[in-house]
Image (cartoon, helix red, strand yellow):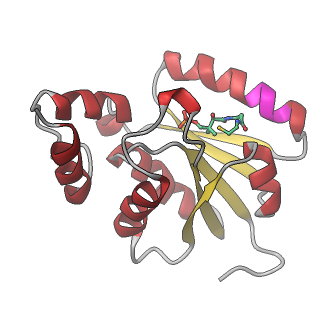
Amino acid sequence: MSTPDSRVVVCPGTFDPVTYGHLDVITRTSAMYDEVVVGVVNIPWRKGGTVFSAEERIGFIENAIRGVPNITVEAFSTLLVDFARLKGALAIVKGLRAISDFEYELEMNQLNHRQAPEIESVYLMASDKYSFISSSGVKELATFGGDIDDLVPGEVADALKERLGR
Ligand code: PNS
């Protein structure tokens, strides 16, 4: 339950679709702050579009985090820092897997910091068992009939197989 003193953070992403790696970062974040708002990017033309609609992507996350009381999920289609300000967030929290993530995240960090110096960015290192998972890798596996059952929740695996499987 949010109060005026709550320490709120935003975990942002496209989540097309959410993976166990994302869910690991989101739940670990929820153990450190009072309230976590998962911000799902809803900009249909960005990066060539998404496989799943924002409503579907939100539903997958909500079903996966059901029972964790301090996590909510919302779409946004503004600058990330404007969404974070709207939510009263003190920080943006993201996961980092490899050096390749670091380069992209350093750029995003500097962009975001320039727009909103009062909002800190915090990075959690991916747990070793999830450090190789990416949404794009999971989609590629699903397209060609690979095994994705250990990488995403069951309903996401089913939806991926239905939408992308050949
Ligand atoms: O890698 P992702 O999941 O597509 O990341 C999305 C997001 C919003 C976390 C990342 O693009 C970011 O930090 N963007 C900052 C710049 C911004 O506000 N862009 C507009 C919304 S995408």
Q: Which residue shows up at 76% across the image and 63% down it? A: 87
Image spot of residue 122 (x, y percent)? 67, 42
Magenta residues, as a range?
109-113
Of residues 54 and 85, the one nearer the viewer is 54
For this view, does 92 lie left or right of residue 39? right
Please tell me whether residue 47 is drawn above or below residue 28 in the rendered image: above
Q: Which residue shows up at 49% across the image and 54% down it? A: 54
Name the quadrant of the N terminus.
Answer: bottom right
- Answer yes or no: is residue 33 visible: yes
Please tell me whether residue 107 is drawn above or below residue 17 in the rendered image: above
Magenta span has 96? no
Magenta span has 112? yes
Question: Which residue ends up furthest to the front in the rendered image?
Answer: 45
Ligand 1 located in image quadrant:
top right
Please tell me whether residue 4 is drawn above or below residue 30 in the rendered image: below
For this view, does 110 lie left or right of residue 95? right
Secondary structure mostly seen in magenta is: helix
Image spot of residue 51 (x, y percent)? 36, 41
Image spot of residue 139 (x, y percent)? 28, 33
Q: Which residue shows up at 40% across the image and 67% down it? A: 65
